[in-house]
Image (spheres, rainbow, N blue to C red):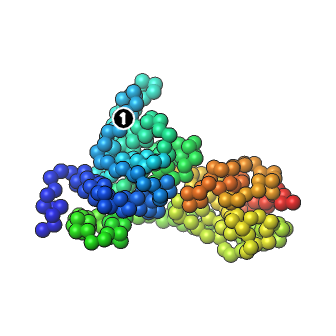
Amino acid sequence: MNIFERLQSNRLEDYCTDILVDILGKDENYDLLREFCFNEKLLKISEAKDDKSIIIKSQFCPIEPKDVQTKSRIDIQITGENFICFIEMKVESSQGKEATIGETGEKEEKSQLKKYHDCLINLKTSKKEYLRFCTKYNEKVSTEDIKVFKEFGNKVKNDFYFKDFRWYEIHDFLKKEKVNDSLIGEFLEFLELKNMSYLTGRIHYDEKVSFQFFEMLSNLKIVLERVKQENVEFDYISIVGTPQLRLDDHKRYGFSIPLGDRNKTKFPYSTNAFIGFDFGEIDKISQLIWFWSKDYDESKLKGWQFKIKGENRVNGEEVAGLRVQKEFKKDMPLQEIYDWFISELQNIDTN
């Protein structure tokens, strides 16, 4: 019989969380802990890559601010030299809501994730904050909470402030990284016994919505292909290939263009461009033109609506970029969308 199944005495999610923290917190598993934090599919914390002082705790109550409404017991807290991360862990149960007294004195309900968020930001730490949510199923986070997390991430210049992941991804990570550790082997077997080692959840499919989405992509492709045909006018960039749909951290549809030696450009080799549509916001789509680089000469681009310098990151490194964006209106004519792209691309002066 599996040792962890035999010893289980409390709620499954607390039990699994405590085992995971015990494994990752062992001195001999420090490299495993660091990789757990840095791993793209799990916590995706770039600051953890070379950190030598990471500490992990479970069921932890951090030093609380005076506002008792933000008090919360954290399932997992991980701190490093330059970061702090709160993780809410769920298995079979879903997020609960608790009644609290809001700023106006009225009662309001907060999700557990929102309470974690409030607690985290009220610590007023100088370290970079991260909020993570681990579930067995693909549990939906409310639109209101996602909006709050995104706005805070933008405010503190952290594109990856909030991220969710699954227990099966923890299983896959440990299975790949384990090195003759019988305890990890037992835990992997336990996760398999509890059906936490493979994809779970269901696809919520709506035929009408799906048809409309792909019809929209088809029309967007028509616009982008037309823009591509006109790019002969722009002596600083050549649009090649076909529009691509990205469904990772950046939900976008358009042309991703590496510049430098492969393009007729005056930009540094490390420059990249994106021309297309951004689906990153909860309730809107944006037309987007974005140039970014680790070695950017801002004087080469003029006439842009937005100038963003040092606020973007690629693989954890600071980059400079220039970006123009416009909200996509409902029932917007294709010609109007096309005209916007052409007009903004013509605004670029590389002389």
* Image quadrant where residue 19 sits: bottom left
Task: Answer yes or no: is residue 205 visible.
Answer: yes
Q: How many marks?
A: 1
Quadrant including the N terminus: bottom left
Q: Position of residue 37 (x, y in %)?
A: 42, 57
Q: Secondary structure at mark 1?
A: loop
Query: Taking 297 as reference, is 112 left or right?
Result: left
Q: Residue 269 in the image: x percent, y percent?
A: 72, 68
Of residues 4 and 78, the one drawn nearer to the viewer in this rendering: 78
Quadrant in which the C terminus appears = bottom right
* Vertical position of residue 224 compared to residue 289: above or below: below
Q: Tell me which residue sits at (15%, 52%) in the image.
A: 9
Left or right: residue 171 compared with residue 270: left
**Which residue occupies 69% across, 50% down?**
309
Q: Is residue 162 left or right of residue 57?
A: right
Pick the front one: 35 or 332: 35
Amino acid type of the residue that numbered disc 1 sits on in the rendered structure: Ile
Residue 123: x and y in percent read 43, 36
Residue found at x 59% / y 57%: 317
Query: Farthest residue in the right direction?
Result: 351
Side (left or right) of 238 relative to 257: right
Residue 306 vs 65, above or below: the answer is below
Q: Is residue 279 visible?
A: no
Q: Is residue 102 above or below residue 36?
A: above
Residue drawn at (75%, 60%) of the image? 341
Q: Which residue is mark 1?
A: 63
Residue 288 placement (x, y as % from top left): 68, 57
Label 1 crowd bin: few (<14), some (14–19), many (20+), radius 10 Å:
few
